[in-house]
Amino acid sequence: MTFYPDERIGIFIDGANLFSTTKGLDFDIDFKRLLDEFRKRGRLIRANYYTALLEHEEFNPLRPLVDWLAYNGFKVISKPAKEFTDDQGRKRIKGDMDIELAVDMIESAAFLDHIVLFTGDGDFCRALDAVQRFGTRVTVISSLRTTPPMIAAELRRQADEFIELQDLRDLIGRERKG
């Protein structure tokens, strides 16, 4: 990883994508260790976590994580997820946070030197291009080692640097619960 001690760093986490990736790699993220790790690498200015939440459920398994993140150094950006029934009659949940994440990343590029994006979603290529035109470097963290790979080839090519999430396991991971 190429980081410089005085560079201003912003972390942007696509929560749903990161969850799927870590599930495929069979470990969880220790978010305290993640913050500590990037604070060592430069001046951490921003740490944003994006997720959609089912608001009307009595118990939402994401709520404890979202609450912990909000009280421990992350800005949590969320919106209500939408439930619908697909063509086969199956209950589905949709809660895309791509636009929110992309807009925040582009707006932050003016005061960040380096953006660390946790996602493999190729839809972010144009946002990366916009950020890079500000002179902001972008590191994408995802995985080629999941089946199928979670990183879109075009996103990997657009990034200034790609880091395999599995390679960070010892620095920011913890064993999967349950």
Image (cartoon, rainbow, N blue to C red):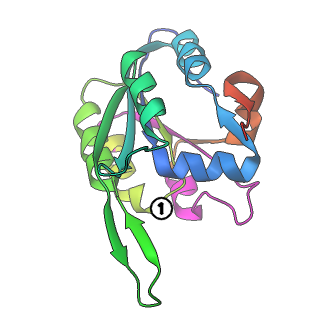
In which image quadrant can residue 2 be found? top right
Identified at 57% across, 10% down, the residue is: 40
- The residue that disc 1 covers is 122
- Residue shown at 76% from the left, 54% from the top: 145
In the structure shown, which secondary structural element does the residue marked by tag 1 occupy? helix
The one nearer the camera, 110 or 48, is 48
For the residue pair 149 and 174, the one nearer the viewer reads as 174
**Quick check: can you spot residue 121?**
yes
Residue 11 located left or right of residue 105 = right
Look at the picture and state if 88 lies above or below 160.
below
Query: Which percent across, then down, holds residue 142?
Result: 61, 47
Residue at the limit of the structure toward the front, as seen here? 58
Quarter of the figure that contains the C terminus? top right
Q: Quadrant of the N terminus?
A: top right
Q: Is residue 103 above or below residue 109?
A: below
Start and end of the magenta stretch?
133-158
159 relative position to 28: left or right: left
Percent coordinates x, y for residue 3 in the rendering: 56, 21
Residue 92, quarter of picture: bottom left
Instruction: Find residue 52 and report its horizontal and vertical position in percent.
Output: 35, 50
Q: Position of residue 27 (x, y in %)?
A: 73, 39
Q: Residue at x 37, y 80 (%)?
A: 85
Q: Name the residue: 49% across, 42% down.
A: 61
Nearest the camera: 141 or 160? 141
Q: Residues within 10 Å of mark 1 (few under 14, many from 20)?
A: some
Residue 143 makes an appearance in the image: no
The answer to whether residue 26 is magenta is: no
Q: Type of residue at label 1? A: Gly
